[in-house]
Amino acid sequence: MSDQKSFVAGQSEPWSVAGPTDDETIQHWIQIVRGEYLEVPGLLLTRIQMERLWGLEAVSCDQILDALIEARFLVRTREGGFLRAQAAWGPTKNSTSG
């Protein structure tokens, strides 16, 4: 199996995603994915799209998604996409004026 390398925005060195990942690496990727969803309102990606976009292996991507869903940051749509929970639920009473 050859090593896959992927570039992360703002990094000059590729990020190796081949092989097992440790908790620190998963936490790093959770922050990257969370940041992207915060930067792009309404972002809706499937797991396959995330794997391609960030060069993640399926197992790592699943761990990241599981953590973000458990934290209630992301929700899964009926179509299999992942959306920021706040966008899926709409504005709360406290976030609307009037």
Image: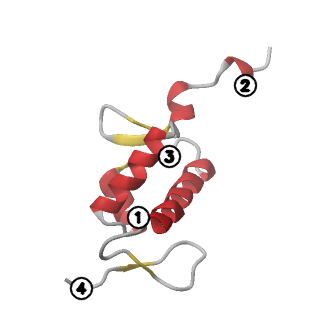
- Amino acid at dot 3: Leu
Scheme of image coloration: secondary structure
- Secondary structure of the residue carrying numbered label 2: helix
- Name the residue nearer the viewer: 23 or 41: 23
Report which residue position mark 3 lands on.
Answer: 43
Q: Is residue 44 visible?
A: no
Between marks 3 and 2 in the image, the one whose residue lies nearer the viewer: 2
Report which residue position mark 1 lands on.
Answer: 53
- Name the residue nearer the viewer: 2 or 38: 2
Q: Is label 4 in contact with label 1 (beta carbons under 8 Å)?
A: no
Report which residue position mark 2 lands on.
Answer: 95
Residue count near mark 2 (Cα–Cα under 10 Å), binned few <14, some 14–19, many ≥20: few
- Sequence order check, earlier mark of 3 and 2: 3
Q: Position of residue 22 (x, y in %)?
A: 41, 68
Is 47 left, or right, of 36 in this rendering?
left
In the depicted structure, whether residue 62 falls above or below residue 77: below
Residue count near mark 1 (Cα–Cα under 10 Å), binned few <14, some 14–19, many ≥20: few
- Sequence order check, earlier mark of 4 and 3: 4
Residue 2's label in the rendered image is: 4
At horizontal 50% and vertical 30% (from top left) the residue drawn is 88
- Secondary structure of the residue carrying numbered label 3: loop
